Image (cartoon, rainbow, N blue to C red):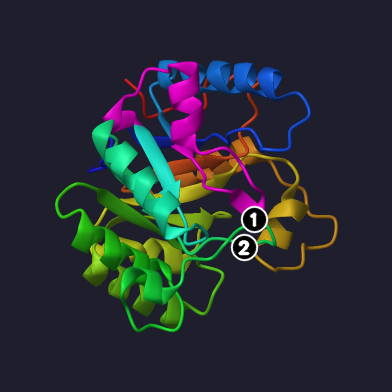
Amino acid sequence: MNTLFGTPYLIELLTPKQDDADFEARLEVFAERYQRILDAGAVVSIPDNPMGNVHFTALEVMDFLELPMDPERTLLHLNSFHLKSDMDAFLRTAADRGLHKLLVISGDGGPRLPRLEPADIRVEDKTVTSIVLLGYIEREYPGVFTCGVAFNQYEPPEHELERLRWKIDAGARFAITQPVLGNDPTVASLVDFEIPIFAGAWMSKRIDLLMQCVDREPEPDMVYSPDENLALLDRTYPEFGLYLALLGFKRDWAGLFTRMG
């Protein structure tokens, strides 16, 4: 199984928000969690202003804390809600640090986040989608980055599968799905694209939050076990890696990473 990173597990870790009241404490927490992920043999996956909230960038935090940077075990996210100057600075710094794995997404906007305009990157598209952003990165940094994209199996399958093909044509080399609940035929079909796929694993018991994120109504009295679902994904998609979102850092991880070793 080609997982691209040398490990099948990607674990999401958020940087502090810029308006966090106790910023120094949040930095310490980030550093501890960052090291724990690496010690577990997994990849640190760091989102870019998730849900439209303004966070410090991964590179700002990693540089400030002088954290060890492992290019093969670090995945940086980049979305289209940036000034071009800031985005270019981020890409140049990542390249200088040897951090070459990117997850490129359209992203969520907000009143405090400027959106990259097509004219900024000399294209005639109406908006800067992940496909447009991929094309820019491939054009301006040829051979520097290995870019991945998101796949939303909750959208109409024909549309989303076609978009994935367009993303691959634009330069995507791997894909990460939205959190998967058990056996999903659309997710299973991604094996046909012959690129590394990571199935999303929702590691919070708050299944209602996931349903809100994907605009679905939770089933009445639905009981959800993150560990049981992770084990099911492990069995159902043996060809895929696993992307763990909202994994608790206060809990014992023993027994979760069954593919290690």
Between 141 and 108, the residue placed more toward the observer is 141
Image coordinates for residue 134, horizontal then vertical, percent: 31, 63
Dot 2, how many residues are within 10 Å of its Cα: few (below 14), some (14-19), or many (20+)? Answer: some
Q: Is residue 78 left or right of residue 29?
A: left
The quadrant of the rendering that contains the N terminus is top left
Position of residue 178 measured from the top left corner of the image (x, y, whole percent): 53, 57
What residue do we see at 28% from left, 36% from top?
5
| Residue found at x 57% / y 37% | 56
**Do callouts 2 and 1 mark residues in contact (Cβ within 8 Å)?**
yes
Which of these two is toward me, 71 or 207? Answer: 71
Q: Residue at x 57, y 62 (%)?
A: 114
Which label is found at residue 52? 1
Counting the numbered discs, the total is 2
Tell me how far mark 2 sits from mark 1, CA to CA.
5 Å
Q: Is residue 164 magenta?
A: no
Query: Visible in this render: residue 11?
Result: yes
Residue 210 disc label: none
Looking at the image, can residue 250 be seen?
A: no
Q: Which label's residue is closer to the chain start, 2 or 1? A: 1
- Residue type for callout 1: Gly
User: Is label 1 in a helix, a strand or a loop?
Assistant: helix
Q: Is residue 230 above or below residue 251?
A: below
Q: Position of residue 36 (x, y in %)?
A: 50, 17
Would you place residue 66 above or below residue 192 in this image?
Answer: above
In the rendered image, which residue does mark 2 sit on? 109
Q: Is residue 49 magenta?
A: yes
Image quarter for residue 133?
A: bottom left
Coordinates of residue 136 in the picture (x, y in percent) = 28, 64
State the extent of the magenta-drawn residues as a range.
45-73
From the viewer's perspective, tell me whether residue 85 is left or right of residue 193: right
